[in-house]
Every structure is written in structure tokens, then in C-alpha cells.
């Protein structure tokens, strides 16, 4: 867009100049409000973006704790693989249906604190409660009357199993719902030129947070005073996660003020600059320079507000319209959602069972072996080693996120998207075929590349679709959409692909593991689904990105 110019007699006005002028007027207008909203219309420094996205550190800490310890926790309280994977399916099944509704409520929320932050706060409170309950399910069960017997001898109803499942559902549903809401908040608070940067910053600091989280899981806390006081490795790590969630959420929610929906509906100058508004301003400036070389600032501001009828009257979606739009998805979103779904199938095959895979297949351990046995000791050592591999995974995603913007500029979004998925498919195939400590690290690096890709590019594309109010291109021309789609809802549906993938993986993989007698099948699955996602990505509409 920066390279385009508008000819008006002897005067040439670049698109960049027009956009700069529009942002400046909105910045001044926001500055003069009873509450300052000028931050919505300016570039933000890297440090400001880091501050805004600190909640992602909390989310990645939670993912680290869940992926490293939930499967061992469930197996350790006597739940076999077949039923453990079904339990994993409960919270994503709820999330697939409820998370988009939560996002739709967020789009319509009329709180003086904004639309996204109240929902984020609610979800993080639920998250912290789940994290507190999860590692102590067995202990709470003993308080309620469960007998203290070995896991393999358990039978019948047990309170500890129920309490643990409740904690898992609360934590897992809340963390992923918060993930989608947070990214919507980031994009709401930034001008479109900052969208690629804020998404990559979120991946970067999330990777750093996850790296530290997995390192915590790799430490044998039972031999420390803290671990002895809290009772176990799991309890120590989850306590640390609760503290990090509290700190990260507080920093993010106090970073930038949102415009309440009521004010946003009444004041067009506080809304993001749409493509229609930009084109109207472009025509206005051309006409003004042809008629007169001098015009008052007051008239310029009044003229600028006269944008297209569709944008001026755009309203937040009610539930009926949200459900209608959910059924009538544009083709561009269908392809993007399918690609994200397949990507998450690969990611979850690796993520949910990787520490168990390392403990069983590489270290020859057994999670259900007797306390003090060699098999249990080897399994615990494998879980800690798997945590170290997962730390490498998130660190590589953080490092790659620093380069992804430059990669897009050099090779195009299409090449970066497809290439990241294919690379991970190769890495997963390698570790499944060659079971060694070295290949564990190799596949973790390639998964880091895929993770950085699927948590930046798809969100950036949806932002681009909404900015242009278009979901299709014909002969290089954008086709304007007549649908009034909620930005938060579309982002949430994208995030819900993780829920749908987790339901399928959770319901199917347990039986597959039992049938094959080996968790190696989950790594082969990760390779296959990443390959299918790469093929789907070839059909995505990239809007010249």
C-alpha cells in the first residue's frame, strides 16, 4: 500500500501519507477524550508489546505443566491409557462449543472496562482454581474417604479421580479460551502495521515462558525443601504456574485501556481504520486538492468521518447472527480453519503424550510400576528428559518467531506457512524411526518452528481479512464481503480448532496406543497430520501477504 499514490492534478499523495494523517487525527481525538484512548492509533515499541502480551507467558507455563504432568498424574491415580485419553477429551469438547460463544459474548460485552479484559479476567480466575485443584486431586480424595492403595489395584468410584478430572477440565478449558481472547485483545489494541509484530512477540515471550516452565518440570523437586513442603514434583510446578498466571495476567490487563462498546458505537473516530474508511479519505483528499489547496482542520475531520454506510452502521453480532455466520463460513475461513485443525492434530499428538513416549519408549520405563522399582525410576527420568525436550521446543519457537516476519518478507507467507509444516512432518518421522535422546531434541526444534507458524500466520490472516472486509480475491482484486462478522468470534473459532483436534486425539489415540502396544504411534500421527496440514495450506487465500 505504501508504494501507491493518488494523483490529483499536479499533487501526488501516497497511501502512507494518507494513513499517517488519519492516524494522527484519531490519535489527537483519542487524546482529548475524558479517558485517553490515543494508544489505539500509534505504533508501539517492542517493550510495550512485551508488556501487553505477558499473559502468554502464563498460558505457556500452564501448557508446560499440563503436557508434562497431566498424563503421569492420571496414570498415577490408576486410570489406564484408554480412559485417560477419553478424559483429555472432556474439556476440549466443552471448549469447541462454548469458547466461540464466550468470544461472541466478548464482542457484545458492554462493560466500562472494555470487551476483552473482563472475559480474560474471568477465564484466568477459573484457570488458577483448576491449577490449584489438579495436583492435589488424590490428596483431596483421601480426605473424602478414598483408600490408600496402589494405582493398579484401584477399582470402583474414587473421589480423587473425580476431583482431578474437575481440575483438569477447569484448567484446560480456561487456558485455551484465554489464549484466543488474549490474541483478540492484542490485535484490538494495535494499529494494523503492528499486528505481525505483536503476534510474533507473543510467540517469542510465550516460548521463553514455556522454556522456563518445562525446565521447572525437568527438575526433581522431590529432593528439595520446596518439593518436600508441597508434597510432590507436580504440586511444586503447578504452584509456580499459579503465581506466574497471577503476575502475567495482572501486567497484561493493566497495560492498555479498551474503548467501551457503547462509546465505540457512538464515536467513529475511536474505531480502527477500515479499508472503506481509508478509501473514502483517499477520495476526499483527491477532491479537496482539486478544489482548493487550503481547507480547515475542522472540515477535514468532519469529512473523514463520512465513511461507507456498511462500516458506519456495523453492529456487534447477536447470538442468532453469530450462529448463522458460524454455519455460512466464507471459503477463505473454511480453508484456514481446516489447516489449523490439521496442524493441531499434529501438534497435540506430539504435545499431550510426548513425555510419556520418552519415558516408555526411550527410557524403557513404566508409569504404573511399583514405588521404588527400576521401571518407575526410569519412567520418571524419561518424563524429566521429555520436559527438557519440550523446553527446547518452546525455546526454538521463540527464536524462530524473531525471524518469521523477515522470512515472510523474503519468501512470502505461503512459503513460510507450508515450509514450517513440512519441516515438522520430517522431524516427527525422524524421532519415530530413530528412537534416541538426540532425535528427541531434533523433533522438538521442528515442532517449535511449526508452533511459531500456526500461532502467528493464521491470526494475522484473519486480521487481514477483517481489515479489508474481504474473504476472497479474483484476478488480484479483493471481493468485498456483505457479512457482518465479529472479529473476536472468528479468532475464537480459529482457536477452537485446538479443542476439536484435542477431542479427536483424546478419543482415538488411547485405543490406537493399546492396539499397537506402543506410544510411538502418536509421533507417527504427528508427522502425518503436519504433512496433511501443509497440503491444506497450499489452498489458503493469502491476500498478497
Image (cartoon, rainbow, N blue to C red):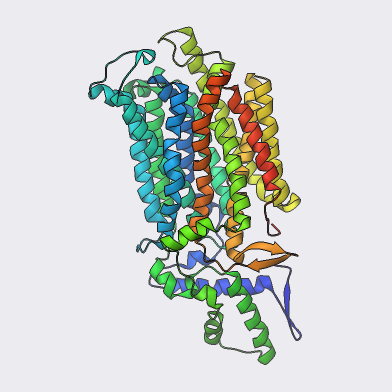
Q: Examine the rendered structure and indicate whether residue 81 appears above or below residue 7.
A: above
Specify whether residue 257 is in view.
Answer: no
Q: Nearer the viewer, residue 204 or 165?
A: 165
Return the x and y of residue 148 as percentages of the image width and height: 29, 15
- Is 28 situated left or right of 410 in this image? left
Return the x and y of residue 510 as percentages of the image width and height: 51, 26
Residue at 40% across, 55% down: 117
Q: Nearer the viewer, residue 483 or 27?
A: 483
Could you say which quadrant of the image residue 266 lies in?
bottom left
Figure label count: 0
Return the x and y of residue 212 as percentages of the image width and height: 50, 33
Q: Examine the rendered structure and indicate whether residue 35 appears above or below residue 435.
A: below
| Location of the N terminus (image quadrant) | bottom right
Residue found at the very far bottom of the displayed protein: 291
Q: Nearer the viewer, residue 98 or 398?
A: 98
Return the x and y of residue 210 as percentages of the image width and height: 51, 36
Q: Examine the rendered structure and indicate whether residue 333 appears above or below residue 22.
A: above
Residue at 44% across, 51% down: 252
Residue at 51% across, 51% down: 493
Could you say which quadrant of the image residue 229 lies in?
top left
Q: Nearer the viewer, residue 8 or 21?
A: 8
Q: Examine the rendered structure and indicate whether residue 418 appears above or below residue 43.
A: above
- Is 317 situated left or right of 529 in this image? left
| Location of the C terminus (image quadrant) | bottom right
Specify whether residue 310 is in view.
Answer: yes
Amino acid at each position: 500500500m505504501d508504494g501507491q499514490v493518488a494523483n490529483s492534478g499536479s499533487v501526488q499523495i501516497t497511501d502512507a501519507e494518507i494513513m499517517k494523517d488519519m492516524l494522527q487525527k484519531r490519535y489527537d481525538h483519542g487524546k482529548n477524550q475524558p479517558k485517553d484512548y490515543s494508544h489505539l492509533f500509534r505504533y508501539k515499541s517492542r517493550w510495550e508489546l512485551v508488556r501487553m502480551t505477558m499473559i502468554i507467558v502464563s498460558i505457556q507455563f500452564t501448557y508446560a505443566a499440563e503436557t508434562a504432568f497431566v498424563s503421569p498424574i492420571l496414570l498415577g491415580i490408576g486410570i489406564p491409557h484408554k480412559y485417560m485419553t477419553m478424559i483429555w477429551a472432556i474439556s476440549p469438547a466443552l471448549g469447541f462449543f462454548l469458547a466461540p460463544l464466550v468470544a461472541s459474548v466478548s464482542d457484545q460485552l458492554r462493560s466500562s472496562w472494555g470487551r476483552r479484559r473482563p472475559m480474560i479476567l474471568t477465564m484466568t480466575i477459573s484457570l488458577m482454581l483448576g491449577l490449584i485443584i489438579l495436583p492435589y486431586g488424590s490428596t483431596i480424595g483421601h480426605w473424602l474417604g478414598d483408600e490408600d492403595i496402589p494405582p493398579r489395584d484401584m477399582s470402583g468410584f474414587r473421589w480423587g479421580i473425580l476431583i482431578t478430572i474437575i481440575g483438569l477440565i477447569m484448567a484446560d478449558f480456561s487456558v485455551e479460551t484465554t489464549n484466543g481472547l488474549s490474541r483478540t485483545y492484542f490485535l484490538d489494541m494495535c494499529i494494523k502495521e503492528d499486528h505481525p509484530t505483536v503476534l510474533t512477540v507473543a510467540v517469542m515471550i510465550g516460548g521463553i515462558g514455556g522454556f522456563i516452565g518445562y525446565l521447572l518440570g525437568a527438575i526433581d523437586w522431590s529432593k528439595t525443601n520446596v518439593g518436600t513442603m508441597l508434597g510432590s514434583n507436580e504440586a511444586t510446578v503447578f504452584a509456580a504456574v499459579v503465581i506466574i498466571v497471577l503476575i502475567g495476567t495482572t501486567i497484561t490487563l493493566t497495560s492498555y485501556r479498551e474503548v467501551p462498546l457503547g462509546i465505540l458505537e457512538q464515536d467513529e473516530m475511536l474505531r480502527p481504520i477500515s479499508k472503506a474508511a481509508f478509501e473514502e479519505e483517499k477520495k476526499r483528499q483527491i477532491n479537496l486538492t482539486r478544489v482548493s489547496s487550503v481547507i480547515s482542520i475542522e472540515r477535514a475531520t468532519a469529512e473523514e468521518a463520512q465513511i461507507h454506510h456498511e462500516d458506519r452502521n456495523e453492529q456487534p453480532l447477536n447470538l442468532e447472527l453469530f450462529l448463522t455466520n458460524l454455519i455460512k463460513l466464507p471459503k477463505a475461513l473454511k480453508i484456514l480453519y481446516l489447516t489449523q485443525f490439521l496442524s493441531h492434530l499434529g501438534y497435540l499428538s506430539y504435545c499431550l503424550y510426548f513425555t510419556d513416549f520418552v519415558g516408555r519408549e526411550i527410557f524403557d520405563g513404566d508409569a504404573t510400576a511399583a514405588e521404588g522399582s527400576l521401571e518407575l525410576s526410569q519412567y520418571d527420568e524419561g518424563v524429566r528428559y521429555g520436559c527438557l525436550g519440550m523446553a527446547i521446543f518452546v525455546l526454538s519457537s521463540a527464536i524462530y518467531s524473531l525471524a518469521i516476519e523477515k522470512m515472510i518478507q523474503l519468501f512470502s507467507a505461503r512459503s513460510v506457512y507450508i515450509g514450517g509444516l513440512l519441516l515438522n512432518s520430517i522431524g516427527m518421522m525422524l524421532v519415530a524411526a530413530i528412537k534416541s535422546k538426540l532425535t528427541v531434541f531434533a523433533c522438538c526444534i521442528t515442532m517449535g518452528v511449526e508452533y511459531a507458524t500456526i500461532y502467528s500466520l493464521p491470526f494475522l490472516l484473519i486480521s487481514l481479512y477483517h481489515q479489508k472486509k474481504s474473504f476472497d480475491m479474483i484476478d488480484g482484486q479483493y471481493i468485498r464481503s456483505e457479512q457482518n462478522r465479529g472479529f473476536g468470534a472468528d479468532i475464537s473459532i480459529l482457536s477452537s480448532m485446538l479443542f476439536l483436534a484435542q477431542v479427536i486425539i483424546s478419543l482415538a489415540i488411547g485405543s490406537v496406543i493399546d492396539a499397537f502396544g506402543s506410544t510411538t504411534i502418536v509421533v507417527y500421527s504427528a508427522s502425518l497430520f503436519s504433512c496433511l496440514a501443509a497440503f491444506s495450506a497450499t489452498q489458503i487465500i493469502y491476500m498478497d501477504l
